[in-house]
Amino acid sequence: MDDYMMGVISRALKITRSFERKFYSLLFFNVSLLSPYTTYRISTDVKVRSLKSKAAPFYSKSREETFSKAFPSSLFRVQVVLLGSKPRQTSPAIRAESKPSSPTSNHNLDLRSSLASVKILPGNKGEPKPRSRGLASADLICEPKLVYGEAGYVLEDVPHFADFIPSLPTYPNPLQDNQAYSVVKQYFVNKDDTVAHKIVVHKNNPRGTHFRRAGPRQKVYFQSNEVHACIVTCGGLCPGLNTVIRELVCGLSDMYGVTKIVGIEGGYKGFYARNTIPFTPKSVNDIHKRGGTILGTSRGGHDTSKIVDSILDRGINQVYIIGGDGTQKGASVIFEEIRRRGLKVSVVGIPKTIDNDIAVIDKSFGFDTAVEEAQRAINAAHVEAESVENGIGVVKLMGRYSGFIAMYATLASRDVDCCLIPESPFHLEGNGGLFSFIEKRLKENGHMVIVVAEGAGQELIAESMRCMDQKDASGNKLLLDIGLWLSQKIKDYFSGKRKNATINLKYIDPTYMIRAVPSNASDNVYCTLLAHSAIHGAMAGYTGFTVGPVNGRHAYIPFYRVTEKQNKVVITDRMWARLLSSTNQPSFLHQRDIEDSGEDDKASLEYFETDNGHFVGEVCDDVSSTL
Ligand SMILES: Nc1ncnc2c1ncn2[C@@H]1O[C@H](COP(=O)(O)OP(=O)(O)O)[C@@H](O)[C@H]1O
Ligand SMILES: O=P(O)(O)OC[C@H]1O[C@](O)(COP(=O)(O)O)[C@@H](O)[C@@H]1O
Ligand SMILES: [Mg+2]
């Protein structure tokens, strides 16, 4: 950033000066380097809205100018966000950080006192894809918080109170006097510790995306007696929900001496439709031994304003939200509304999904338990199938869009002959189809077991039944029962005129039995770590984040990262190949599928492509490919 740039920024800022006290002014100021050392394009985009109404900006001005100048930096974009009248929303200086390729690129620009932040984001080419957001007004403030470092290092940071409430007091972390923790060497994590998103790297690769490491900080933003925490569980059930609740209550109490902790009953709608229930370590002592959630849960019913009003009315200042991708989207809009109102309330998401389809994190809690519990159903199907002539066992497992439970349960069992998942479309008839494989396997072994994920083959059923798309209260697609449909199709095929063969098919649907069990030992420990990471983050003033392990280390992940896409089994990956080789089932893959899958990979690669052709960060969030 040199004098010329400072001049241009000052000029642009003058445009908004007159609006500053009365209105919510927003100035976007973009600088793109078209090619190194040559031409720049600058565009200023000033929008001014009334603070009171969310109506369209009443003042809007965009300008673009091109100029040539030799800047020894690579692509960058400057964004200046002015947050108007309320004094607590202002900060004394603009802080600008830029990509490391410019050797002298970190500056504090003391241009004026009303600027909240200046961010330098990747320029057009390396710019992240737009994130999906909940509230329209949130567009103003939920830009990714990116920090660039040496050698292509990028920190995708999470929001902090200090970003929007200046001069909050801090206190020493009470853990330093805690009998159990005070003896731990270096108990507090270094404030600059971050966790790499991708752990497999090449010599010349940029260092890529990182997330803030979870853990206790030396300074906290809440005094113990000031904290009023609440816990809510939303979406479908999952083993471990009660364990997370227990560990949040016990962790807050044991580590930080918090006494005011309440549960919100029945999911999001419980915030405004139900009374809270008080929690103590004693009242939650045994709940991890039970399946389900003692709080109850629901789909639908997310009303952001009513929820935030209720948080405010009850004096709650830490909100722990346990749920899947839908829930995290809900948590994100709650956070944005809280931030918009300038409240000191931390909003923390704890990712839950039995399907293991939440992006970025290594694995979701309850997944291991589900895979283990699925073994019982697969064993039963196998026993039934091998006891009779031409026995076929069909087991349906959960997995709305992702077949992780089916894939891992199949790999773990070795009794499964064929695994069908949503990511791998299959066909029934003809060469390479499922029916001919069943015939072959029955001929070879006299019996077989098929595992089918509930989301598999949906297009086949829809085609044959001409069904309409139906949705649940949260907007999730309601699935047609692939297990029943497939079982009937197999029976029809073998009883058909041409075949007239006797088969003995037993269909087992253990889906809800699996989901309702308590979490196993390793999931219990995992739930403890999740809860503790969440508590440490909230106490340290972080907010608007989800916790979870990234390459084995717990991290704070911005909401948008876990809601923008779902994890899916990559069928051109080594893990799925392991499965195919263990079952020897047809791959059902056509050349076209392989090419399409390559296209997807390319698309996500482009997102991170840098000038020198190396890739920053991920190809895809494939948790199946950890080996
Ligand atoms: N885009 C969204 N914005 C706000 N709330 C949402 C959104 N999607 C889902 N929710 C809310 O999150 C809760 C759980 O969502 P759901 O999809 O049922 O389960 P899960 O969180 O397990 O994916 C529901 O109360 C639903 O209303
Ligand atoms: O019957 P419900 O409660 O809608 O749940 C069924 C769905 O819940 C799941 O177990 C998990 O879904 P969520 O993570 O969205 O809660 C899916 O596998 C399944 O399709
Ligand atoms: Mg979901």
Image (cartoon, rainbow, N blue to C red):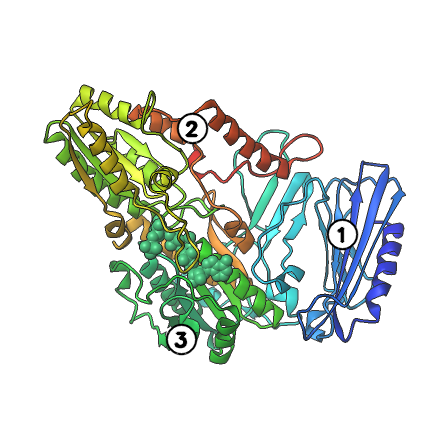
Q: Residue at x 58, y 63 (%)?
A: 135
Question: Foreground: 594 or 29?
Answer: 594
**Horizontal arrangement in the rendering, residue 78 relative to residue 270 (left or right):** right
Q: Which residue is mark 3?
A: 273
Nearer the N terminus, badge 2 or badge 3?
A: 3
> Residue visible at 46% across and 66% down?
302
The amino acid on which the numbered mark 1 sits, given as a three-letter code, is Val
x, y percent for residue 376: 20, 42
In percent of the image, x 29 and y 34: which residue is there? 410
Circle 2: is it few (<14), some (14-19), or many (20+) Cα within 10 Å? some
Label 2, label 3: how many angstroms apart (C-alpha)? 48 Å
Quarter of the image where one finds residue 182: bottom left
Q: Position of residue 503 (x, y in %)?
A: 15, 29
User: Are dots 2 and 1 in contact, CB under 8 Å?
Assistant: no
The mark closer to the camera, 1 or 3, is 3
The kind of residue on which mark 3 rests is Ala
| Mark 2 beta carbon near ligand 2 (under 8 Å) | no
Mark 1 CB in 8 Å range of ligand 1? no
Mark 2 or 1, nearer chain start: 1
Q: Which amino acid, by three-letter code, is at mark 2? A: Arg
The answer to whether residue 217 is visible is no
Compared to 78, does 84 lie above or below?
below
Q: Which residue is mark 2?
A: 574
Dot 3 falls on a residue whose secondary structure is helix
Residue identified by numbered label 1: 78
Residue 141 placement, left or right of 26: left
